C-alpha cells in the first residue's frame, strides 16, 4: 500500500497507545489551578507540561487553538512550539481550529494547518461544513496529498446546534448531520478503494452526549467523540454511538485529565488509566 492515510496512522498509533484523544485546553481557570499566570509565559509552561505527559500516552492529542489565539502573536509562537514538540516525539496532533470558508480563503486555511511549509502544520484539523461540505474541498484535497486528516463537525452536543444539525432534508430523507457524515464517507470510500486502506483520512466529530445521533456505519474514518468526562458521557456512551465502528472511535477527554496537573507523572498516569478503562469498555 502507498503512504498510509491519516486513518491508518491513527489505527497504528491506537494499537500502541490506545484510542483515547487527549486535549490541551489551557483556559484561564486551569492556568490558575496550576498556579500559572494567565499570560503567554503561563501558556508556555502549561503546554510544555502537557507535551511531556501526553506525547507517548495517547493515540491523538487535540490542541484547542482558541486559547492560544487569545494571546495574539505570543500565543501563536507557543502554539507553534507545542505542535512541533509533540510531532517530534511522534504524536498525532489535531488542531481544533474549526475552520470553514470558501474558495481561496479555504485554501489558505488548508495551507496554514496541513502544509509542511507552515509552522502550524498538524496531522489533522477540525473543520465546519456549514457553508456546504463541498466548500471544504481545498482542505480535503491538501489532506489527501499530505496523508493528513480533517475532522468535519457532524453532530455536536451543544444545545444551540440541535435545530440546524437535526433538521430534516426532505429531498434526501435524512438530517443535515447525516448528510454531512454520508458525504464525508463517500469521499473516504473513494480513497480507500484507490489505496486499499482500512480507514480514510477524513473523520467526523460526533458529541458523545448527542441524542438521536446520526449513523457513522459507512464513514470509514475516525470518529472523534468529545464529551467524555467533565461533560458527563462515559466510554460506554461513546461506544454505543458507533458499535459497528468502535475500532475507529476516539473519545476525547480534556479537563477531567488536566485536573491532575501540573504534576507530569500524575497527568500521564491518569491518561494511561483512562486508556485502560477505554480498552476494557471496547472489549
Image: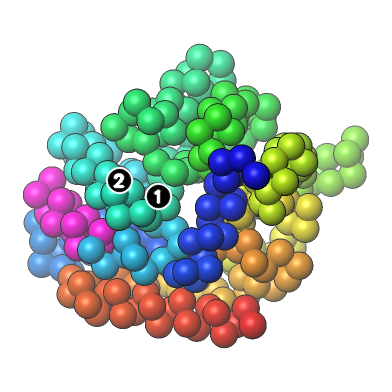
- Range drawn in magenta: 39-51
Whether the magenta-drawn stretch holds residue 266 is answered as no
Mark 2 burial class by Cα count in 10 Å: few <14, some 14-19, many 20+: many
Up-down: is 60 above or below 127? below
The N terminus sits in image quarter: top right
Whether the magenta-drawn stretch holds residue 41 is answered as yes
Determine whether, in the image, residue 44 is placed left or right of residue 231.
left
Disc 1: which residue: 93
SS state under label 2: helix
Determine whether, in the image, residue 158 is placed left or right of residue 272.
right
- Considering only order in the chain, which callout, 2 or 1, is on the residue closer to the N terminus? 2
SS state under label 1: strand
Q: CA distance from mark 1 to mark 2?
A: 7 Å
Tell which of 132 and 279 is nearer to you.
279
Percent coordinates x, y for residue 245 in the rendering:
71, 64
Q: Can I make out residue 16 in this image?
A: yes
Q: Can I make out residue 96 in this image?
A: no
Disc 2: which residue: 83
> Mark 1 near mark 2, Cβ–Cβ under 8 Å?
yes
Quadrant of the rendered image containing residue 95: top left
Marker disc for residue 50: none
Amino acid at each position: 500500500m502507498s503512504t498510509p492515510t491519516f486513518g491508518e496512522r491513527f489505527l497504528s498509533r491506537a494499537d500502541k497507545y490506545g484510542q483515547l484523544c487527549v486535549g490541551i485546553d489551557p483556559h484561564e481557570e486551569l492556568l490558575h489551578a496550576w498556579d500559572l499566570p494567565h499570560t503567554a509565559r503561563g501558556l508556555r509552561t502549561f503546554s510544555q507540561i502537557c507535551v511531556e505527559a501526553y506525547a507517548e500516552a495517547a493515540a491523538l492529542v487535540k490542541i484547542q487553538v482558541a486559547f492560544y489565539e487569545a494571546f495574539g502573536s505570543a500565543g501563536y509562537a507557543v502554539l507553534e512550539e507545542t505542535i512541533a514538540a509533540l510531532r517530534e516525539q511522534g504524536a498525532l496532533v489535531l488542531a481544533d481550529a474549526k475552520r470553514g470558508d470558501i474558495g481561496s480563503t479555504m485554501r489558505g486555511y488548508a495551507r496554514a494547518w496541513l502544509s509542511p511549509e507552515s509552522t502550524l502544520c498538524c496531522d489533522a484539523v477540525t473543520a465546519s461544513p456549514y457553508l456546504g461540505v463541498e466548500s471544504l474541498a481545498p482542505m480535503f484535497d491538501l489532506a489527501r496529498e499530505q496523508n493528513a486528516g480533517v475532522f468535519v463537525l457532524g453532530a455536536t452536543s451543544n444545545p444551540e446546534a440541535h435545530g440546524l444539525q437535526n433538521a430534516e432534508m426532505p429531498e434526501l430523507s435524512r438530517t443535515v448531520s447525516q448528510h454531512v457524515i454520508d458525504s464525508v464517507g463517500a469521499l473516504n470510500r473513494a480513497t480507500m478503494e484507490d489505496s486499499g486502506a482500512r480507514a480514510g483520512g477524513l473523520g467526523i466529530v460526533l458529541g458523545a452526549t448527542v441524542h438521536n445521533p446520526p449513523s457513522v456505519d459507512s464513514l470509514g474514518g475516525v470518529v472523534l467523540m468529545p464529551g467524555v468526562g467533565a461533560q458527563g458521557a462515559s466510554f460506554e456512551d461513546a461506544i454505543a454511538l458507533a458499535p459497528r465502528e468502535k475500532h475507529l472511535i476516539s473519545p476525547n477527554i480534556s479537563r477531567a485529565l488536566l485536573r491532575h496537573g501540573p504534576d507530569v507523572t500524575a497527568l500521564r498516569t491518569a491518561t494511561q488509566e483512562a486508556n485502560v478503562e477505554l480498552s476494557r469498555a471496547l472489549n
